[in-house]
Amino acid sequence: MTVRKSGSAGAPDTAGTEELLRRALAGEAETVGVSPDALGRIRGSVRRRRARRWVWRPGPLRVGAVAATAAAVVAAILAGLGGALPRPGGTRPPNPAGAAHPGRPVPTANLPVYYLGPSGVGGRLYREYHQIPVAGPSAARRIEAALGAMFGLPAADPDYRSPWPGGARVGAVTVDGATASVDLTGAGTGDADPATARMAVQQLVWTATATSVLPGQATGLSGVRLLLDGRPATSLWGTPLPAQPLRRGPAAEVLAPVWVIDPQQGTVQGHSFTVNLAGIVPGATMRLRVLGAAGAVIIDRTVRLSAAAPQVGTASVAIDDLPSGGYTVEGYVAPARGGGEQWPDDHRFTVG
């Protein structure tokens, strides 16, 4: 270990030496695991050495004592770590998304993930929120975690799906300005028609840009550069891609016309809760229906959204004093002149 000195010649900065040593040891302690009694053994070793060797004298002897103590501490740590310190010029193995250092809780975040809906609504996008392990608070790490879930975590609603191949993985995510570069591995070969391939790209872009909105911010990234196995993607599964960076398509062309946002599929609610809805519908009017476990209609009412198509409108409806049991909440559009219900979306949940 080399300690650089500062100040006038012949006057070593021992305070600076001690501070550099403290920072180095603190940095390593944050990134590696040691045995539970290592710290006590190290402190005991230092105390014993200080008791034998420390002499309070001005000048070079004091510097020598500091250097001897530093060497002892570093040697003890190296022995306890089994040589785990990185070699000069090397890099540490990457910490996979969600992995935590030994003894630390895994940090998680509630992140939006988009999925494709059934073909009856044109394979449009629906959004779910999932509590996902995240390797760090940056936009890049959040995108990495959300896309990893998009590939590997099935949607809670069985009506939603992801068309990406099973071997698709996130290789790397970097952020430059308002654009995220996403390098995927195992995603270049798939079997999908052009419409599904284009929607899969929008699924990735909407997930990445929505996830990039950090807590306390109103907006996130606006574009995604897609790479497949390290090379810029010009097509996906035989379908040409638009010029990069890729942007969100118009909501009216990409998002499902009706969403049930809350309650999410499979959740447990209290006896009083709020139903949150979204839709891109003419006239900003849709229907809300709640069914009991046996299919009996508990609630059926018209809901007015905050905006009409082509804008995304939202609405919140308070439900009070619902008895314990299983329920289904449905959102749909009722045609003005008869016919079947349009763009239905439903979630099953429990009140308890």
Image (spheres, grey):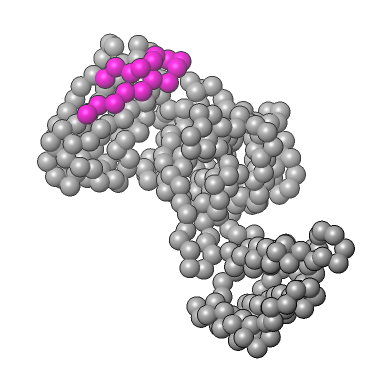
Q: Residue at x 33, y 32 (%)?
A: 260
Q: In the rendered picture of this protein, how many numbered marks are placed on residues?
A: 0
279 left or right, relative to 55: left
* Residue 230 percent across, percent down from the top left: 73, 48
Q: Residue at x 56, y 25 (%)?
A: 249
* Residue 157 percent across, percent down from the top left: 36, 42
Magenta range? 303-318
Viewer-proximal residue among 9 and 264? 9
* Residue 178 percent across, percent down from the top left: 65, 31
Is residue 132 something that shows in the picture? Answer: yes
Q: Residue at x 52, y 42 (%)?
A: 163
Farthest residue, direction right: 9
Is residue 78 something that shows in the picture? Answer: no
In magenta segment, residue 64: no
**Which quadrant of the structure image shows residue 322?**
top left
245 left or right, relative to 320: right
Q: Quadrant of the N terminus?
A: bottom right
24 left or right, relative to 42: right
